[in-house]
Image (cartoon, helix red, strand yellow):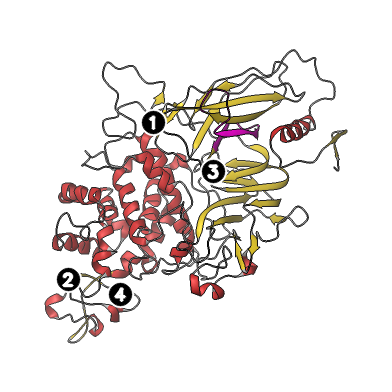
Amino acid sequence: MSWARENGRACPPAQSSSGTAALGALLALLACSGAPDTQPPQDGPPRPAAVRDGIGEDVDGQVTTSSLFGNWDAFVDPEGLPVVYEWSAGTVPGEDDLIAWTMVGGARSAGSSGLDLPLGVPLFVNVRASDIHGHRSEVASSDGVVVGAPRVAQPMPPSPEATPRPGTVGDRRPPAAEPKPEPVTQRAELERHDVTWTFARPATCGRFVNGDWWVLGPVDLVAIRPVSLLDGDRVRNGAMSNPSPTSMRQGYDSSMFADGAAGRYDAATNVALGVTREHPLRLAPGTSLVCSVSQTAPAQLPQLESCAVLTCLAEPPPADAFRPPYCGTDKRCRWLAGQLDLTALARLQPVAGAPDLGDLVAHFERTWLDHVPGYTSRYLHPRRNMPDYGRELADLVGAAALALQLDLTNEDKRPLVIALVQLGIDVYGVVHGGGRFVADGGSGSGRKFPLLFAGALLHDAELLQTARSERLAFAEDVQTFYVEQTAPGIYNHGHGGYGPEDVGLPEWGNRHGDDPSLDHKAWTADPYRRCCTANAWAGQVLATRIMGLREAWAHDALFDYVDRYLQVESPGHWMRAWSPFAERMWDRYRMDF
C-alpha cells in the first residue's frame, strides 16, 4: 500500500472496501484531517443518539417494499472529536439480516433500494459511531417501520378522533418542518438506484433535493458498478456524459433496439467501458454522468433495467436545489425547492380509486431516461424507473397531476411535487437541447405537462416559455388540430377526407404536425386514435384546466379535442379512459373547470 503525507503525518489512501477495512481507512483519513497531533485522553466512545425510520420525521409504516431509509441525530464524542457512522437494518433491533453493516462516513442519513422487504413485521434501522481512536459506540436502533402499512409520522398531534392516514383525504395534521438536508460530506463511494461510483480519493459530495448525488470536480472515478463490459459480442451497463437529445445513437447497450442495434450503439459515447484505478474516468464540472444497468438478456424491450445520474459541479449547490437536466452542459443549479408555490394546487374532494401519493412517488423518484427521439426510445426507458410506452407514461403523469389536486396537505403532496418538478426539469433539458417527443402512435405522450407544472410552481419564465413555444416537441400538440381550409376549396391540405362542414372541428392525426397525409376523418380509420393516445390524456388535460394553465399550454386544439373525444367514446370503456380514476375525476369536475 502506498502512503501520502498530510499535516505532517503519514496517511493511507482512501479504500472502497466495506466493513472493518473501510472503517479503518475512514478513521485514518479523519486522523489526517487536521486534528492536532496531541489528543486529550479518551474517556469513552461516542454517545448513541436518536435513530428515525424514513428520511425526515420518524415514520411507523411505509408502502414501498423495495427501499428503506433511516436518519439520526449526531453521536457526540466526549472529547468533541470527529466520528464516522455505520448503519444496518434487521428484523430485530441491532441485527443486520436485511442490510449488512455499511460505512456512510460522516453522513447522518442512509438508504438502500432494490430490496425485497418482508411485509407486516417491524424492521429496524441500526446505527453505531466510531471516533478517530477506533472507540465504537453502542448500537442505537429505530422504533421500527412496518412495510405494507401506511406512513404515519411521529410525533402526532393529540386528537380525540382517529387521525386519517397521511396522503389521504381528510388528513388535517399541521405541516411538519422541512426535513433537514443531508450534510455535505467527504465520500469515497456513492450509491444510487442500483449504481455505485467509487472515487480515487474521498470527494466532496451531497444530494440534490430529489435525492440524486452531486460531487465537486474535477474528480476521478476508478470504478462504476455494475461494470460496463464486453459480454461475448455485446457491451452492456454503459454510461454517457451529457447525452445529446438529437442523436439516435447511444452508449448504454449494444443490443439496444433489437435488429437496429448495430447502427445505434456508439462505443465512443460509452465512457464507462474500461474504467479502472489505472484508467480512471475524469469528471469535469458541468458533467452529468448517466449510468445504466442492462437487462441480463439481449434484445429486450426495454433493454435497460435501471439508471442513475451523478452530477459533477464546480461548487456546492444550495441545499434545496433540484438536479440540473442530465442533457446539455448547463449545470447551473437555478431551481430551488424553496421557490415552489404549492398554492397553485387545488383541494378537491376525491373520487373512488384515488391513488396513494406514496405509490405515485415510487413511480417518479427514479430518473426517466428519455433522450432518444422517436418510438425506439421505448428500448431506452429503464424498466425499474418508468413505463416504456407513451400511453402509460401519459396516464401516470395524469394520475399524479390529478392526485395533487385533491384535498391533501401540502406536506403530503410535497414529495410527489418534487419528483414531478424534477421530471419537468429533465424534459426541459431534452427540449432545450433540440430534442422532441415525436408523435408516432402513442409513443410521445405525457412529457409536456411535467414541464408546464415545473414552470408554474417555480414561477420560471424560461420553463413556461419552452412549454409554450416548442409546440412540435410534444406529441399531444403535434397530433391535435382544427380542420381548416388551407387553399380555396381545399381542406387540411387535401388530406383526410375533410370538407367545408368540418371547418373548426377539433381533430386528431397520427403525425399531423409533421405529416398530415396520415390524417383520417373516419373515427376508426387509425387504431391509434382510440387505443393509445387521447384515452390517456384526460388526467393531464383536466389537471391543466384545474390549475388554470390552459392558456400557458398554448394549444387549444388539444383541450377541445379531448372534450370531443370523451363525449364520443362510451363511458366505462378503456378506450374512453385508460385510468378509471382519471375518468371519474373528468366526469365529476370537467364542468367546473
Left or right: residue 374 versus residue 350 is: right
Reading the image, the residue beneath label 3 is 208
Instruction: Say the numbered circle drawn on residue 512.
Output: 4
Residue found farthest to the bottom: 488
Along the line of sight, the residue nearer the viewer: 415 or 473: 415
**Residue at the image point whose x is 52% and y is 67% from the top:** 256
The kind of residue tagged 2 is Leu
Give, as a single range, the part of the protein colored magenta: 91-111
Reading the image, the residue beneath label 2 is 505
Which is more N-terminal, label 3 or label 2?
A: 3
The kind of residue tagged 4 is His
Q: Is residue 366 above or below residue 270?
A: above
Q: Tell me how far mark 1 sits from mark 4, CA to CA.
A: 46 Å
Reading the image, the residue beneath label 1 is 151
Does any portion of residue 593 appear in the rendered image? no
Does any portion of residue 194 appear in the rendered image? yes
The kind of residue tagged 1 is Arg
* Local SS, label 4: loop
